[in-house]
């Protein structure tokens, strides 16, 4: 049944809009204006029926009456305020019979973006770790951070390689926060954590009714949620071949189609992928698509394992203790050198993640405010269970020489700090420096 809306009813509707709205007929006479429009443009009341050029002499709405074309996103300054303007023709039966303009202050748009950013934070769609905050000063990790900073200046795809626990997601977040996309969302997903069908729906979303149990109204995928920001695909080497094909299409076309949908949604997303697997080996065994590999492998960042940067252990331990102490409210004032000495006798197959687990257990179960040998007895047993303590001599003199040399370089020749990091007294350090002819 048709509803006949009177003028006062229509006016109430447009006055309820947060945008300013003003409309003219084909002669340029004002036929509708809402309260927000009069406030933003500084117009008097009671101007319906008047010529728009009497109040806005060079009104661009006259151009719309002539061209019959839409104009989106025009920015103008009115009364010292910047506004974003959209202009549209009013077309009836194929004929332009008027024009309407909608507009709002840019400050309102910025406030809206801040609210959206807050929602990103609440839903975890935000990066937290900057590259400068990643613990470690060894040459290996310093080079990785420097390279990551260079990558952040571009918008190209980044592939991060490294063993499990080396901090691939931390670097992905750091790259995002150092890039021009820092104000956009950072969305992460572990491709190995979900079976193929669930990973597909998470990445690409689905329309209502796409499958049994689909959410009413559908659900946007992570590509849509990451629009304007960065999508981090962890463990990309575990992705199935069908999903790889779908991902390749998105990277090539920059559009996403939801499961069960017909519409292609444009997306502006930077991809940072990571894996602990040898992708070239997966290429040879036909488990990874070569076209996707070359699309992802534009910029490559290799993260060193912890066993290759043992001099960073004190920095890492202090960083971990700082986080845990604040979280659980238990102050830790220091760590005995004997703890660091024991840590350097271990190969750390789980890398920084394993180190964090060990330190967390020490902090939680430690009796005092300083961590010592009594707090790490469980770790000593772990070493013995794996073939006994691997003393520096067992690793080889050349490796020990390189470790001392790199630590000296790291501390800029500070012998006291070097001895502390290596878990030995200064006399032992001097003796070994003499032995290896280090100065």
Image (cartoon, helix red, strand yellow):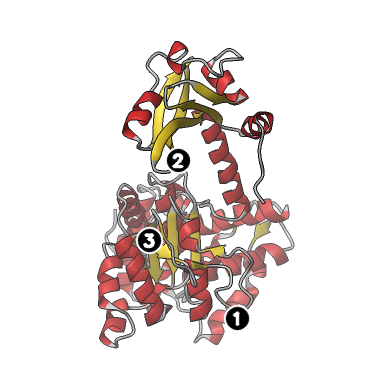
From the image, tell me which residue sits under label 1. Answer: 381
Task: Categorize mark 3 by other alpha carbons within 10 Å: few (<14), some (14-19), many (20+).
Answer: some
Disc 1/disc 3 C-alpha distance (Å): 54 Å
Compared to residue 359, the image places residue 388 above or below, namely below
Report the residue marked by disc 3: 255
Decide if residue 48 is on the left or right side of residue 287. Answer: right
Q: Quadrant of residue 160?
A: bottom left
Residue beneath label 2, please?
A: 92
Disc nearest the viewer among 3 and 2: 2
Please tell me how crowded label 1 is: few (under 14), some (14-19), or many (20+) other residues with Cα within 10 Å.
few
389 sits left or right of 393 in the view: right
User: Element at badge 3?
Assistant: strand
Q: Are the residues flagged by discs 2 and 1 in contact, CB closer than 8 Å?
A: no
Q: Quadrant of residue 11?
A: top right
How far apart are the alpha carbons under marks 3 and 2? Answer: 33 Å
Task: Give 439 or 301, whichever is nearer the viewer.
Answer: 301
Residue at position x 68%, y 33% in the image = 9
Q: Position of residue 263 (x, y in %)?
A: 43, 63
Residue under the image location 51 percent in, 72 percent down: 201
Does 102 sit left or right of 301 as displayed? right
* Visible residue check, residue 276: no
Q: Determine whether the residue tagged by mark 1 lies in a helix, strand or loop.
A: helix
């Amino acid at each position: 049944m048709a509803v006949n809306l009177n003028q006062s009813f229509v006016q109430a509707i447009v006055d309820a809009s947060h945008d300013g709205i003003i409309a003219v007929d084909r002669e340029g006479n004002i036929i509708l204006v809402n309260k927000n429009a009069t406030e933003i443009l500084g117009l008097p009341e009671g101007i319906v029926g008047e010529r728009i050029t009497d109040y806005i002499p060079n009104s661009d709405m006259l151009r719309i009456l002539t061209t019959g074309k839409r104009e989106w996103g025009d920015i103008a300054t009115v009364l010292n305020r910047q506004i974003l303007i959209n202009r549209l023709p009013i077309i009836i039966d194929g004929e332009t019979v008027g024009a309407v303009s909608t507009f709002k202050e840019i400050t309102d748009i910025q406030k809206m973006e801040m609210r959206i950013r807050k929602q990103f934070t609440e839903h975890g769609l935000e990066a937290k770790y900057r590259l400068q905050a990643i613990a470690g000063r060894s040459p290996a990790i310093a080079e990785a951070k420097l390279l990551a900073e260079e990558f952040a200046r571009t918008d190209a795809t980044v592939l991060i390689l490294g063993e499990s626990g080396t901090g691939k997601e931390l670097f992905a977040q750091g790259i995002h926060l150092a890039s021009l996309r820092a104000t956009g969302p950072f969305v992460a997903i572990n491709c190995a954590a979900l079976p193929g069908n669930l990973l597909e729906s998470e990445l690409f979303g689905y329309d209502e009714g796409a499958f049994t149990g689909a959410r009413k109204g559908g659900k946007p995928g992570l590509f849509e949620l990451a629009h304007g920001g960065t999508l981090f695909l962890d463990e990309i080497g575990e992705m199935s071949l069908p999903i790889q094909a779908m991902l390749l299409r998105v990277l090539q076309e920059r559009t996403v189609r939801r499961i069960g949908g017909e519409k292609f949604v444009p997306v502006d997303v930077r991809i940072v992928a990571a894996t602990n697997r040898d992708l070239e080996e997966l290429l040879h065994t036909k488990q990874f698509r070569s076209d996707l590999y070359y699309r992802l492998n534009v910029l490559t960042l290799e993260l060193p394992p912890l066993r290759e940067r043992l001099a960073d252990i004190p920095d890492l331990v202090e960083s971990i203790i700082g986080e845990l102490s604040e979280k659980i409210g238990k102050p830790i004032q220091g760590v005995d050198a004997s703890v660091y000495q024991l840590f350097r006798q271990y190969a750390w197959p789980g890398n920084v993640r394993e180190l964090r687990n060990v330190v967390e257990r020490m902090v939680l179960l430690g009796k005092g405010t300083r961590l010592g040998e009594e707090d790490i007895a469980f770790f000593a047993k772990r070493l013995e269970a794996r073939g006994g303590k691997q003393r520096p001599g067992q690793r080889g003199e050349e490796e020990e020489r390189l470790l001392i040399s790199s630590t000296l370089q790291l501390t800029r020749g500070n012998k006291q700090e070097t001895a502390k990091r290596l878990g030995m007294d200064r006399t032992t350090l001097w003796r070994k420096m003499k032995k290896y002819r280090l100065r």
